[in-house]
Amino acid sequence: MTSSPIDRITDIIDPGDALGEVLFGLIMALTLTVGSRLVLRSPLVVEAPFAD
């Protein structure tokens, strides 16, 4: 008899801990996505200090 992957995971990890891991992963992915969009939205302009 084969058990589903969810059954095997819940035997090892508490469902509350599994939910916490999933939420943490989503928060990290969204942080990386939003952060990279903010950084790459405006180009970095470097000006020479004494250019006339």
Image (cartoon, rainbow, N blue to C red):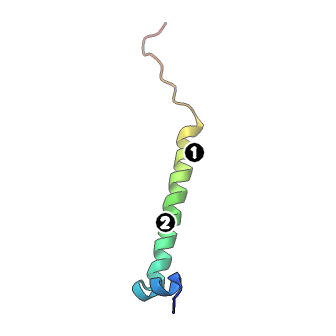
User: Of residues 4 and 13, which is closer to you in this image?
Assistant: 4
Under tag 1, what secondary structure?
helix
User: Residue 23 at x, y = what percent?
Assistant: 51, 70
**Above-or-below relation of 38 to 32:** above
Q: Identify the amino acid type marked 2.
A: Gly
Kindly give the residue lying farthest to the top in the view shown: 52
Which residue extends farthest bottom?
1
Q: As displayed, is residue 34 above or below residue 46?
A: below
Question: Residue 37 shows which numbered tag?
Answer: 1
Out of 17 and 8, give the one closest to the viewer.
8
Residue occupying the far front of the picture: 1
Above-or-below relation of 39 to 34: above
Find residue 28 and report its horizontal and vertical position in percent.
48, 60
Three-letter amino acid code of the residue under disc 1: Arg
Identity of the residue drawn at 53% across and 85% down:
4
- Residue closer to the observer: 27 or 14: 14
How far apart in space, not on screen, are marks 1 and 2 (Cα)? Answer: 18 Å
Mark in the foreground, 1 or 2: 2
> Which residue is label 2 attached to?
25
Q: Residues within 10 Å of mark 2 (few under 14, many from 20)?
A: few
| Residue 27: % across, % down | 51, 63
Residue at figure coordinates x 53%, y 46% from the top left: 36
